[in-house]
Amino acid sequence: MAKIIDGKAIAAKIRGEIATEVTRLATTGITPGLAVVLVGEDPASKVYVSMKEKACQEVGIFSDEYKLHAETGETELLALIERLNNDPKIHGILVQLPLPKHINEAKVLETISPSKDVDGFHPYNVGRLVIGKPLFQPCTPYGVMVMLKEFGIDLAGKEVVVVGRSNIVGKPVALMCLQQHATVTLCHSRTRDLSAKVRMADVLIAAVGQPEMIKGEWIKEGAVVIDVGVNRVGDKKLVGDVEFAAASLHASAITPVPGGVGPMTITMLLHNTLESAKRQAQG
C-alpha cells in the first residue's frame, strides 16, 4: 500500500515556520498584510475567504477583508485595487475568483501590482515563472512542489505527467517541474490514449477537475501520485481526480482528498505574503 503524503502535517510545519518569521519581522516594525476581496455571494468563495482569514490570524498576518455586492461595477473594483496597490500596510492582494460575469477577470488580475500579486496570476509573474526567475509562484502548484520536497522526492530525471492544463495549476506546475530537471508531459481531458501517458509517470500530478477520471490500474508500480482535484460527489463526499483506493495498490506514495494538497494552497499564500513584506523591509 502507498504511503500517505499528509498535506495537513506538512502545512502545519510550514505555518509554524511562517509564524516565527512573522514574529521576527514584527521587531522591525512591519506586520505582513493581506487584503482579500470578495465580490458576490458564491458559497464556496465565502468558505475559502473565511479559511484564509483564519489562517492569517493563526500566523500573525494582518488580514483586511473587502466584501462587495455582486452588482459592484468593474470601475469600482479596479479603484479599490489601485488603493490597495498604494497602501503600505498591504503586502498581498487576493481577489477571490470567480468574479461576476459583468467584470473582466483578466483586467482585474492585471490591475493588481505584480509586487503584491501573492496569487502569482499577473502576466508579469507568469512570465518570470516561465524564464525560471519567479517573484511569486501560484499557491497550489507551489504547494505541490513543497510537498514533494518535504517528502524527499527528487524530480531530477523523473518522468512527470501532469493531467490538466489550467493557468492556475496545470501549466505552472509543469514549468516548476521542468525547473527541477524533470521530463514533463502535459496532458488534458482530450489527450488521446491518456492511460498510456499516465502509465509512463514516475510522478503523476492530477489537476483535471473530473472525479476519479484517472483509474487506479493506470498507475505505474512505485509511482508518486499528487491529486489536486477536489470534486463533490453526492451531498457530502469529496473525491479527487484519481481513484484513490485502487491507485494506492500501485503507488509508492499518494495524497488523500481531502487533506492532501488543499491545506498547502493557503499555506503558500501566507508564505508569499510574508515574502512580500520581507522585500519591503529590505527596501
Image (cartoon, rainbow, N blue to C red):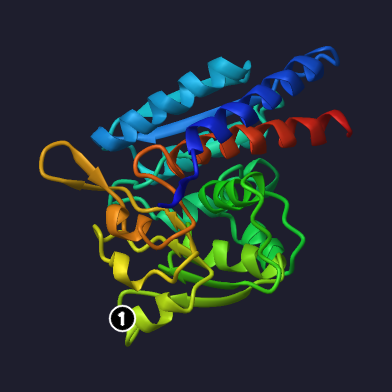
Q: How crowded is mark 1: few (under 14 residues within 10 Å), some or many (20 or more)?
A: few
Q: Quadrant of residue 18?
A: top right
Q: In this view, does 197 lie to the left or right of 82?
A: left
Extreme-left residue of the structure: 234
Extreme-bottom residue of the structure: 192
In which quadrant of the rendered image does the C terminus lie?
top right
Q: In which quarter of the image is residue 242?
A: bottom left
- Image spot of residue 273 (x, y percent): 65, 33
- Image spot of residue 84 (x, y percent): 60, 32
Residue 167 in sight here = no
Q: Label 1 amino acid?
A: Arg
Q: Nearer the viewer, residue 13 or 35?
A: 13
Asked if residue 54 is positioned above or below residue 190 in the image, the reply reads: above
Residue 278 in sight here = yes
Name which residue lies at 35% across and 50% down: 103
Judging by the rendered image, the residue that carries numbered circle 1 is 190
- Image spot of residue 8 (x, y percent): 48, 32
Name which residue lies at 35% across and 53% down: 229
Name which residue lies at 11% across and 38% down: 235
Name which residue lies at 61% across and 45% down: 117
Q: What element carries label 1?
A: loop
- Image spot of residue 165 (x, y percent): 43, 69
Please tell me how many numbered marks the rendered image carries: 1
Q: Is residue 279 left or right of residue 41?
A: right
Q: Quadrant of residue 56?
A: top right
